[in-house]
Structure formats: structure tokens, C-alpha cells
Image (cartoon, rainbow, N blue to C red):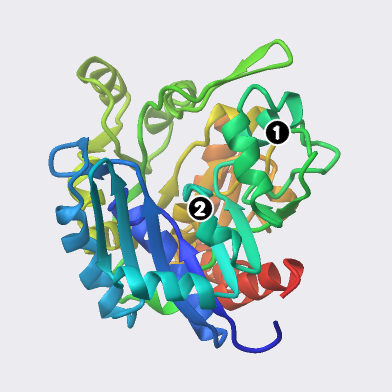
Amino acid sequence: MAGKSKIIVSGIAFWYPLGGVFWQFLHYLLGLRQLGHDVYYVEDSARDVYDPNTNDFTPNPDANISAIAPMLEKYGFKDKWCFRSHYPNQQRCFGLSESQLTQLYHDADVFLNVTGAQEIRDEHMKIPRRIYVETDPCATQIAAAEDAAIDEKTIEQLKAHDSHFSFGENIGQPDCLLPSGPFKWLPTRQPICHDLWQHDSASGDNYTTIATWQNKGRDIYYKGEIYYWSKDREFQKFRKLPSLTAAKIELASAPDYLIADRFRKFGWRFTDPLPISRDLHRYRQYIQSSRGEFTVAKDQNIRLKSGWFSDRSACYLASARPVITQETGFSNHLPTGQGLFAFRTMQDILSALDKIESDYPKASRAALDIAHSHFSAQIVLQSLLSRAGL
């Protein structure tokens, strides 16, 4: 498949129309187009969609289509997207028509299933190459290695792809505790199109992040231990941080009132994440107007040392905003100590803040350099396609 390929990118931008989600997939679309490929975006699912206006799920995708379709078309994907819903007695197709989608499936060379959220249909199996890109490692590796009967649906989904990539870049390395088989997991990371993040905004006063405070339902029991799929437990460990530094720290997150009040007593600031996340432009501006990012990772990635690195943190770096984030093993694969800092302890965080503030312009330049040298879309995606045999 040398030269130009017809590539379908599938994801969850319509299903979950929030800023962080949309920008993640747009980088894939633009990056593959920059490499010369003919690129389409398709969601073809039976799931209810998330409506950020009601903070609930619904079978009616109209509001989500209205939010995402104009943005896809703004960036040059008019007549190159499709959302098809498969609800009982109600199959609806938006963007491409049914016949156009059928023809696209017939003509496509590559199906790139980013996040692995698109269920594989018979039409997809006829596409010569099906690539699974996992952005949230740990649960999949354990389900695949422990016992196929535990999560038969996941195993069948993985078997339907012929290449498997993961943001868990440390999988297979000596210090990673995750099983590396039976599928061959190839490391990848978030591609970044830098022109999306170039800006003239002055750095703000706050180190920020945008995060769901508590996630439920995907904790893992593995080898006699529970590994948690949530960030609240990690934030709790560092709740005294603002009282130990002059740096200002703000979370776009929504803990319950009692927890937020307890954190505010140590100097934390909170802002409502939903208005930021459901406005695609405001999401980007929030990152660009920050001084840097301070964030934690989920317990699973930390203790199992998956090597996961956040796609949102990559956007901070591309905005020339230094990042201080919890160590997951990613420092084995990315340079740290200048624009990017990995921490395990409170002292690590304080040292990183001191280094950034001692020469902020230098830290800002270092962040941008890391984004260009390690996250540029053309580099990341060319590597992915080459290792997938394209």
C-alpha cells in the first residue's frame, strides 16, 4: 500500500462531543491528510450518545451532530464524515449517505480504530487493514492475558484487528507489570498538529488541568490487588501542595462540595469543567492561557507502570506550557527535567515548580521542543503506519 491510501478514522467525537475528545481525533485526521492520504471520519455504532447539555445519554444524536459536523467541515472534511446510528427501529445516517458509506467501506485500504471504541462490523472486516489504537491501557492487557472467558467481547474485538497499538509505551519493558501478550502491543502516542496550538496568549497565573475527579466501574482486580481507574485518590495524596508553594493551582474538575472545601483550605482553586469541555474553542483557550499543567494519573497506570502519557498533556506542551505529571513509566520514552517533569513525591513537584519558575521562558521553549520532536503528527503517524505494514 505504498503511496496514498484511503483511510477511515473511527472514534468517539460524535458519541462524546467534548473538547478533549474532538481535538484528539482531529489530530489524526489532519496528520494523515498531511501525509498525503485520503482521510474520512466515521462512527457507526449502536450506542446512545452523551449529551453534555443534559449530562446524560440519549439515543438522539442531533445536538452532537450540530456541534461536531461544522468543526469537521471547517477543517476540510466536508463530504468526508459519517455518523450512522443503529437503534431499534431507527437507523439514521448523517453526512455520507448509506450508499456512500457502503462504497467507502468497499474502497477503503485502512480502518484506524482510535480508542478501540468502534465495534467491528462485517463491512469493516472486508477492509484490508484494521488497526487498533488503544489510548487507555491496563484493563485490555489484563483481560486478554488472564482468561478470554472473562471478557469475551474485548477479546473478539482485538482479534478483529491485525495490528495493535497502545499509549502504554512501557508495555513489554522490564519495569512494566502489565502482561504483554497474547497480542503484540506496539507503542504509540498522541499525534499533534502544531498549527492548531500556536497562539499569542500570555501565560496565565495558574497551573491547571482538566480532569474527571472520580471514575467508577473500571477498577481492576489483578494478582490479588485492586488497581483503581480514577484520579481522585492521587489528588488526595498531594492535597497540601498549594500551601507549600507560591505557585497557583487550579483544577477544572468537580469533586463534591465537602471534598472541594477541604482542598480549598490548602489553597486549591476549582472551576467548573463542563462549560470548558463542551465548548471546543474554550477548551483550547483554557490550555493556552494556563501557566502550565499540573496533573496526576490513574492508579492503574502508575502502579503497573504502563508508560501512558495524556493526549491533553501533549496539547499543553504544544502550547509551550510546561507539564508536571505523575510518573507512569513514560520517562523511559520521553525527555524529562526541562519542559516536562515526572513526579513521584511532593518534593518532586516542588522541585519542578522551582525549576520552571526560575526561568519560565526556558521551560516554555523546552515544552514546545518536546512537542515538536516527540509528538508531531507526521512523525507519530508515519511510524504507526510503517509498523502496521503500510
Q: Amino acid at mark 2?
A: Arg
Question: In the picture, residue 70 is in which quadrant?
Answer: bottom left
Q: Residue furthest top?
A: 224
Q: Nearer the viewer, residue 56 or 305?
A: 56
Rendered position, 110 above or below 205: below
Rendered position, 222 above or below 111: above
Is residue 339 visible to the viewer in this orientation of the structure? no
Horizontal relation, residue 81 to residue 358: left or right? left
- Crowd band around label 2 with a 10 angstrom C-alpha radius: few (<14), some (14–19), many (20+): few
- Crowd band around label 1 with a 10 angstrom C-alpha radius: few (<14), some (14–19), many (20+): many
Identify the secondary structure beneath mark 2: loop
x, y percentage for residue 134?
58, 49
Identify the secondary structure beneath mark 1: helix
Question: How many labels, in total?
Answer: 2
Viewport quadrant of the N terminus: bottom right
Viewport quadrant of the C terminus: bottom right
x, y percentage for residue 65?
21, 60
Rendered position, 187 above or below 87: below
Q: Nearer the viewer, residue 171 or 69?
A: 69
Alpha carbon separation for disc pair 1 and 2: 21 Å
Query: Residue at image x 42%, y 25%?
Result: 232
x, y percentage for residue 207?
37, 48
Query: Residue at image x 66%, y 13%?
Result: 225
Query: Residue at image x 67%, y 71%?
Result: 385
Q: Residue furthest right?
A: 174
Question: In the picture, residue 165 is in which quadrant?
Answer: bottom right
Is residue 50 visible to the viewer in this orientation of the structure? yes
Residue under label 2, please give it: 121
Residue under label 1, please give it: 144
Horizontal relation, residue 105 to residue 44: left or right? right
Q: Amino acid at mark 1?
A: Ala
Q: Nearer the viewer, residue 1 or 351?
A: 1
